[in-house]
Image (cartoon, helix red, strand yellow):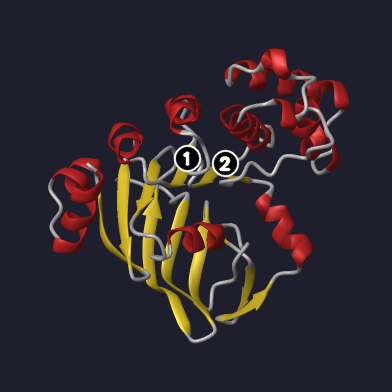
Amino acid sequence: MTIKQTPMIQAVDVWKNFGNLDVLKGIDLEVAPGEVACLIGPSGSGKSTLLRCVNHLEKVNAGRLYVDGELIGYHERDGVLHEMSERDAAKQRRDIGMVFQNFNLFGHRTVLDNIIEAPVHVKGQPVDQAKARAMELLDMVGLASKADAYPIQLSGGQQQRVAIARAVAMDPKLMLFDEPTSALDPELVGEVLRVMRDLADGGMTMLVVTHELAFAREVADKVAFMDGGQIVEYGTPQEVLDHPQHERTRAFVSTLF
């Protein structure tokens, strides 16, 4: 008898609107533990909104989102959803790392202090333990020599690698990436994608909004093409990128390859 594995991410008929604008229109999505799923599609298709709904930075208007079997952002009683307190939602986010387009580092703190901030003050780790882990992560992203530097002294690619290390320092079960290379000069993109490949190789579950189709083809287990607030196609990179079934997907992919 095969035991069905609990998805790391499960979206069930998720809707999100801003005023009269429906941004997500009935999204269904599953990502298994250890998988890398990439969200691709034109600007305004709902990719970043879906990503932000996964950790309740945006509130869904209908449907349900689960991470590792746990309903995100709401308690359900007798079939009715009641929004969690911000404190409870923040507890859920401890297990979900997120890397934004624009780094979001604390400019007045060193690289090392940026990384230990949340483990010490949110998870209560001893400072020495947090520092030791931070140095391991800085070594992983190739920046051990920059521990005492300030963000302004780093390139964009270096700042993004620090942001990744900071997110991983919380030992999340899931990593979300919102176009992590879009704000970088082209020559710096590769160093960030290398770190993301290393995370994927280590078994981290990742949901990535990206325009880097070569990265999606190489690293992703699944690719979702989104357009108009819907998932038009979802499958392996070979299925979606090399043999798309929908004309809209074919047109989009052809402009980027």
Q: Are marks 2 and 1 in contact (CB under 8 Å)?
A: yes
Vertical order, 116 against 224 (above or below)? above
Between 55 and 84, the one lying in front of the other is 55
Q: Is the residue marked by circle 2 packed among few (<14), some (14-19), or many (20+) residues within 10 Å?
A: some
Q: Which residue lies furthest to the top in this view?
A: 145
Q: Where is residue 19 in the image (x, y as percent from the top left)?
A: 54, 84
Q: In which quarter of the image is the N terminus?
A: top left
Which mark identifies residue 173? 2
In the figure, is residue 154 to the left or right of 24? Answer: right
Query: Hey, what amino acid is under mark 2?
Result: Lys
Vertical order, 47 against 83 (above or below)? above
Q: What element carries label 1?
A: strand
Q: Which residue is drawn at 34% across and 35% down?
A: 215
Q: Position of residue 57 (x, y in %)?
A: 63, 62
In the figure, is residue 165 to the left or right of 2? Answer: right
Q: Distance between the Cα atoms at labels 2 and 1?
A: 7 Å
Which mark identifies residue 205? 1
